[in-house]
Image (tube, rainbow, N blue to C red):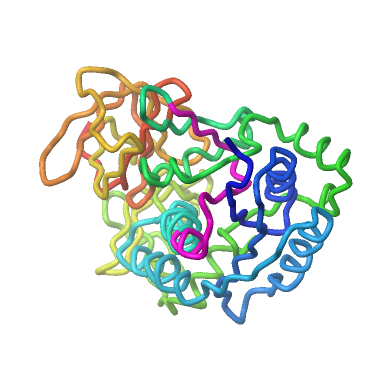
Amino acid sequence: MTKGKKVFVGLSGGVDSALSAALLVRAGYDVTGVFIKIWQPEFVACTWKEDRLDAMRVAVSLGIPFLTLDLSNEYKESVIARMISDYKAGITPNPDVLCNRFIKFGAFREWALANGADMIATGHHAQVIERNGKFELLRGKDSGKDQAYFLCMLGQEDLSRTLFPIGHLAKSEVRAQARSLGLPVAKRPDSQGLCFVGAVDMHSFLKELIHPVLGNVLSPEGLVIGQHDGACLYTIGQRHGFKVSDPERAKVPQYVVAIRTGSNELIVAPEVVKATRTEVEITQISWTQGVNPDLTKHYEGEVRYHHEPIRCSLEDVGDGEFRVLFEQPVLAVPGQSLVLYEGDVCLGGGVIKQTLSS
């Protein structure tokens, strides 16, 4: 029963969250729009005031209360600080996964429930269904916009208190319904880039926060063949952002296949396959069902957002960590989330710890 249930909707100023709020109002929920303000560095163009104004316009058009929640400190500590620490260690984190776990479904959810909400809602392209007493996280209907990957750290308590009102809609349907309802952000372009911060050049963003020093680019044999801006700025598989001074090697693309932050060196090779593996260990495990998946079954694994799912199996190696065995080599980047699926059901996963020999 929806009538009287109080829902706090995260209004970002975009069309997805706007239609989410509108659909909840139409369904009879007691809806409050909440704009979440987060920390943004001075060197990034500040857009939060414009975003908040758009979110407020949506609330006014729907006739719902509007609140602003400042989570700047929480975002800086839980997302940015963790991200910087990982990059300094030579691994590539996923800030969107961190943002969902610690901000939207962490600090925001806790604040909302403490202030009278029964549930929260966001504009994510994902779905939650209850089956046999358990809540399942499913991919969004629109495969091009599906965001279940970024929600892989949500558990049963999170899913039981969360609504994704547009998860069953294609993006084209979202815009069409927003236009038909006269929502003021119906034509606003989708935001891209770092969660909340928006479109930024990650290389430049990190340089401002980490202040790295120049270092050598090495061949697999250990020869110095170029220079880079700082080993911590790069990720496995990257093929740009560094200089190869060796004329012959510069004729073909070179890919980062290893990162040595201790000596500030990058190892590059002309074949990205040198960085691929068939076995990957994951840590910081989180299963959406609250229990380990059946280790006798096969699943589909994604090693990064919108990566083609690859058939795999799972082994429990102890100490809260698992090994994932893929049926074909994958470019698994340490620090990224490896997410397991059974059909359209997102089972959760963990952070890629290290890759083992193929």
Query: Quick check: is 121 in the magenta stretch?
Result: yes
Residue ranking furthest to the left: 318
* Closer-to-camera residue (108/271): 108
Residue 312, x across and y down, in percent:
31, 24
Magenta part of the chain: 110-130
Residue 178, x across and y down, in percent:
81, 42
| Residue 257 relative to residue 43: left or right | left
Q: Is residue 341 above or below residue 216?
A: above
Q: Residue at x 16, y 45 (%)?
A: 320
Residue 305, x across and y down, in percent:
50, 41
Residue ranking furthest to the bottom: 42
Q: Is residue 274 visible?
A: no
Count numbered badges in the picture.
0
Looking at the rendered image, the quarter that the C terminus falls into is: top left
Looking at the rendered image, the quarter that the N terminus falls into is: top right
Q: Residue at x 66, y 37 (%)?
A: 166
Q: Is residue 101 visible?
A: yes
| Residue 76 relative to residue 37: left or right | left
* Closer-to-camera residue (330/350): 350
* Closer-to-camera residue (242/339): 339
Quarter of the rendering containing residue 286: top left
| Residue 206 relative to residue 196: left or right | left
Q: Residue at x 29, y 34 (%)?
A: 277
Residue ranking furthest to the top: 297
